[in-house]
Structure formats: structure tokens, C-alpha cells
Amino acid sequence: MVGYAFMGAAHSQAWRTAPRFFDLPLTPRLRVVAGRDAAAVAAAAERLGWESSTPSWRDLLTRDDVDLVDVCTPGDTHAEIAVAALAAGKHVLCEKPLANTVAEAEAMAAAASAAAERGVWASVGFTYRRVPAVQLARRLVEAGRVGQVRHVRAQYLQDWVADPQVPLSWRLDRAKAGSGALGDIGAHVVDLAQFVTGERLTGVNGILETFVRERPLPASFSGLSGAAGTGTGPVTVDDAAVFLGRLSGGGLATFEATRFAWGRKNALRLEVNGSAGSVAFDLEDMNVLHFFDAAEDPQTAGFRRIQVTEPVHPYGGHWWPPGHGLGYEHAFSHQVVDLLGDIAAGRQPEPSFADGLAVQRVLDAVERSAGAQGAWVDLP
Ligand code: SOE
């Protein structure tokens, strides 16, 4: 693994836990974690359960006991690490968004398709696909239970920078993160909208805003919170993104991604309205899927609140007894389960780098639309 902060901790937990709850065709060994600060990465290895550490990610590429490289760094290093790892014959799991630019994402997708010819696989970590209720939503849409998709209503609402005194961190730095709310959390809802509907966005029209343009420099920062130091610096990314989209099946989509929705902590919401029904999901109530079936008797029809915690449900029966819910971290374990299953079977894991590139093109189109005063931008 490269990187060992928030995402590195989440991935480590998943690599350790998945084989304890699922029968996996391959057994993960946490061989080595890389990070620039030798002392800090050594401490992280100890804390997160890695056998060794190194200050150079390139060391991973020459080790025979490394089969897969898990990229948990900010977006500015994804392309370089992932392309080099694939060239070295290592499978790659890369955090989202795939890259900071379309050009980087294109290079990564090209490297992934060349590697696939050699049975070396790449996947991008749009982890929310692995929430059981999201998988169930996909199953219902795929089975035709909502019919022809008319609307997708997608939001990702957070509030962790709504306070102007929250200091700068890499997620607010365009050079590191590529974009702000758009790429950090908007990317998730773009991916989920396309995953759940099985369609692609064919065009977008959007606006971006940065509400707080100058923030304290950090004295320290960890995860999503930090302490202010002295002096200030510029915020170089969007705080919020709002955009419209057209879907390949003719439906209409609306998206909102913001870090300024006080009280909304991690509210990823997705609602799909089709010709035959609707599904609705909210990550803040992540064990539940709401489903409306338009074929039901109108006298008693209504949104059904499905508790997605039963053995018949996706990933069901592997964790706790029926009715006992899962949390944020379980989706990362499911990611490990699916990825190792696909690698062992010699098939392309999903989401692929091509899927990551498709999302990147949407993000780029939203930025171009916003830059062109809301012009409509078509996607290939
Ligand atoms: C912060 O906005 C963040 O941790 C994102 O970086 C993640 O991708 C998202 O899953 C949760 O929020």
C-alpha cells in the first residue's frame, strides 16, 4: 500500500478483516506500506498491521512478494504510481477520483487495458458501490423493477469545512486534489448514478463556487479536522458543485456536491425514479433502501423501507446475524472480497480504470461548463 492516512487506515482494516469473514480465493498478506516520512510510515505499519515499511513506493515494484499495489495517496500521485505498478506486473487498486486530470486518467486507463492483456488487473475505489443497499438498488434497476429511468437525484452533502476557521489541507489544494467537492465527493455520486442506472451521462451543465477563499494555514491536520496555525493561504478548489446531466437512456439527472451543508455529515443520497417505480438511498441511513413499486394497489402503495441486513441481501450472511447493521468500513472489506474474487477468476474487476476515466470526463465537463458560464458540455 502507498499512503497511510485516512484511506490507508480504511484499506488496511479491510485487507485485515475481509479474510476473517469471507472465504476468499486468495489470502491478502500486508507485506509493505510506503510513505515519504520513514519514521511516520514505520509507525503506521506497526499501527495498521503491515509487515514492513519503506520511504520509497518504487521499492514495492521490485519486490517479488508484492502482487498488488493499493494506492491511497492524494490524486496528484495516482497516475505515476499506478502506471508504474501495472508496468511492473502488479495488480492495482487506486483510490478515487482516478486522477486529477482527464489526460492522467486516459494514461491510466490505457496502462490498465495493456496490463489486462497480461492478466494484470486495475480497479478504482468507488467504494460506495459495495454498500449492500446500493447493490440492492442496482439489482432492482437491472431487474426492471423501476422501469425506464426518468430521473436521478444525487447529492453528496458534508459540512467539514463550513466553518471558515477550518484550516487548509490537501483536499483544498488544487495541485494535490485536482478539484474540491466536485472530485472528492461529486465523483462518488457520478459513479453511483452511472452504476445504479447502468447508463452513462451524455452531457452536463454546471456551476461551481468557492465560498471561503482564504483559510488559516494548518498547525496540524489529520483525517478531516485540523488545528489552525499562524497565517492564511488561498483555497484553490471549489467548495460546492451543482450540475445537471442527461443520461444515455433519455433520463434527467441533478447533482449537488458540497462541504457547506451544516448538519449533513456524510449524506450521500441517490434517488432513481423510473417508469415503474423508484429507489432511494441515504448513506446516513446506510442499512436501508427505500423502494416504491408503481404496480402496487394505489390504496396501499407507498415507499417500502427495506432493511438491507438479511442473508438474502448482497454480502448478507457473512457478518452479523440478520438485522444487525453494517457501517462505513464494511464497504471497504467488500471491495477486497470482490477484487480478490475477480483477480482469482482472471476477470476485469469493477469499477475499472475505464469507469474511473468516464467519471473523470464528467468532472472535467462540469468544470468546463462552469468556466463557460453554464454552457452545456456534451460527453462522448
Ligand atoms: C472527505 O470528503 C471524504 O473522506 C472523501 O474523501 C471520501 O471519498 C468520502 O467517501 C467521504 O468523505
Image: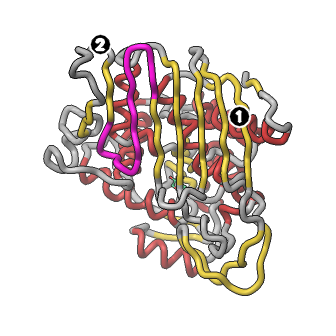
Distance CA(mark 2)–CA(mark 1): 37 Å
Number of numbered tags placed on the structure image: 2
Residue lying farthest right?
A: 372
Q: Assess mark 2: CB under 8 A from ligand 1?
A: no
Residue 319 image offset from top left, x and y in percent: 22, 49
Q: Name the residue under label 2.
A: 295
Q: Residue furthest left?
A: 321
Disc on res. 361: 1
Residue 248 visible at all:
yes
Based on the picture, tell me whether residue 273 belongs to the magenta stretch. yes
Which residue is rendered at x = 24% and y = 50% of the image? Answer: 325
Judge from the rendering whether residue 374 lies leftward or rightward of residue 42; answer left or right: right
Q: Nearer the viewer, mark 2 or mark 1?
A: 2
Question: Local crowd at mark 1 within 10 Å, few (<14), some, or many (≥20)?
Answer: many
Pick whichever of labels 2 and 1 is earlier in the sequence.
2
Name the spot of residue 363 as percent of width and height, x first: 69, 39
Q: Is residue 311 above or below residue 74?
A: above
Examine the structure image and report whether residue 81 is included in the region drawn in magenta. no
Q: Visible in this render: residue 107?
A: no
Which residue sits furthest front?
A: 299
Q: What residue type is labelled 2?
A: Ala
What secondary structure is the magenta-colored segment mainly?
strand
Q: Where in the figure is residue 159, as x and y percent of width and height?
A: 55, 61
The residue under label 1 is which amino acid type? Arg
Residue segment shown in magenta: 272-289
| Label 2: element kind | loop
299 displayed left or right of 202 = left
- The structure residue drawn at horizontal position 39% and vertical position 34%, both measured from the top left corner, is 280
Q: Report the residue at 65% width, 61% height from top.
A: 171
Q: Which residue is drawn at 55% across and 43% down?
A: 188
The crowd level at tag 2 (other Cα within 10 Å; few <14, some 14-19, many 20+) is few
